[in-house]
Amino acid sequence: MNSKAKFFKEFAEKSGAVTNLLIHNEDSPYEVWVECDFQDIGRILILPFSHRYFESFRQFYDGRDPEWDLSAKSRSLSDQHGTDIDTLIDVEKRVVSHQDARFLIVTQGHVIGYLDIEEIDLIKAGQKNYFGEDKHAMLDIAISDRFHGTGLASLAIIFLKFVAATAGVSLYLVTSKKNESAIRFYIKHGFQEADPREIFIPEDKQKGEPWYVLKRNEFEKK
């Protein structure tokens, strides 16, 4: 186990909610996957986005399974894309070709979370992403409403910071001004509202939703 993976395991298990954590393929930010026991949930997996879970992902993302899926509000705050088969195949191709790092959180065969860091390949090459930024990769986290407040989102952000450090990229995100709990969560985990001088924010979006940059990634020095 490399030093970043060892630190991730120690950091995750320190919360008390995570036990028996195992990390596989820890040297690859695209192929790494994790399994652990999570308090009040059971055994969970964090796996690279894969066709194996297309149908479960559709149920989660389209709001078709009230016990496990995202609410309409949560979907509106997520980085949405279609769930038709062609779109999902394209998303999987982006992972396999090492453009994006995208992951599913799975328990009992159900998808309960979706995590992604987009366009890592462009950022690592010093090229501009979709928004024109060339120094930070955009992340997004979507967790089933049933598991809000359990600590699962904290595990997810710690995992993404580990992935980003392994890939060698910095992170940023966009959230809603109205989503005060999410803003507090991201600030707690080392994000600060971005200054337009340190990150490219398109002019038409500078007065819109706030952009946040990761200022503290504990994994970078490991």
Image: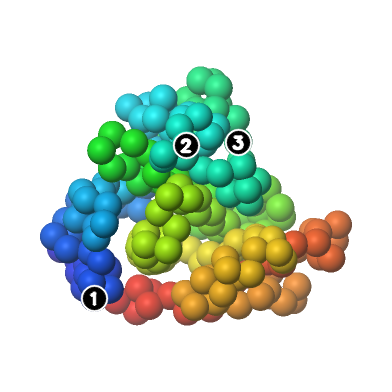
Q: Position of residue 93 (x, y in %)?
A: 45, 31
Give the residue type that dot 2 points to.
Answer: Pro
Q: Can you tell which of label 2 and label 1 is closer to the viewer?
A: 2
Element carrying mark 1: helix
- In the picture as drawn, the residue positioned furthest to the top comes out as 85
Q: Residue at x 43, y 50 (%)?
A: 146
Q: Position of residue 99 (x, y in %)?
A: 49, 43
The residue indicated by pointer 3 is: 81
Residue toward you, 133 or 82: 82
Of callouts 2 and 1, the N-terminal one: 1
Of callouts 3 and 1, the N-terminal one: 1
Q: Position of residue 73 (x, y in %)?
A: 63, 48
Q: CA distance from mark 2 to mark 3?
A: 20 Å
Which circle marks residue 66 in the picture? 2
Of callouts 2 and 3, the N-terminal one: 2
Indicate the quadrant where residue 204 lies: bottom right
Question: Left or right: where does residue 132 sit relative to residue 13?
Answer: right
Residue toward you, 113 or 147: 147
Indicate whether 135 appears above or below 55: below
* Colour theme: rainbow
Give the number of marks. Answer: 3
Give the residue type that dot 3 points to.
Answer: His
Dot 1: few (<14), some (14–19), or many (≥20) neighbours within 10 Å? few
- In the picture as drawn, the residue positioned furthest to the front comes out as 67
The residue indicated by pointer 1 is: 14
Assign the C terminus to one quadrant of the image.
bottom left
